[in-house]
Image: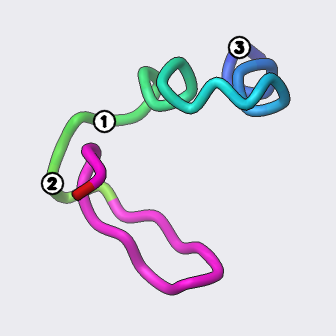
């Protein structure tokens, strides 16, 4: 529920705290695949 609130508030830093901090993390978005916890 906290991640939903963070997303709705536009708080990306707080949202990302719930994800695995690894280069193996994969997100799929409108621009394709993004790898890793930290943005480039």
Instruction: Identify the residue under disc 2.
Output: 23
Residue 27 against residue 36 in the figure, above or below? below
Instruction: Identify the residue under disc 3.
Output: 2
| Helix, strand or loop at mark 2 | loop
Question: Which label belongs to residue 1?
Answer: none
State yes or no: residue 9 in magenta: no
Crowd tier of the residue under label 3, counting other residues whose Cα lies within 10 Å: few below 14, some 14–19, many 20 or above: few
Instruction: Identify the residue under disc 1.
Output: 20
> Mark 3 or mark 1, which is nearer the start of the sequence?
3
Distance from disc 1 to disc 2, alpha carbons, whole Å, reads: 9 Å
**Start-end of magenta stretch:** 26-39
x and y, in percent, of residue 15 in the image: 56, 27
In the image: residue 29, left or right of residue 8: left
- Classify the position of the C terminus by image quarter: bottom left
x and y, in percent, of residue 27 in the image: 46, 64
Residue 21 against residue 33 in the figure, above or below? above
| Helix, strand or loop at mark 1 | loop
Residue 8 is drawn in which quadrant? top right
Residue 24 is drawn in which quadrant? bottom left
């Amino acid at each position: 529920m906290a991640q939903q609130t963070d997303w709705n508030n536009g708080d990306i830093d707080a949202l990302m705290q719930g994800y695995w901090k690894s280069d193996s993390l994969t997100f799929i978005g409108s621009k394709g695949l993004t790898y890793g916890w930290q943005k480039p």
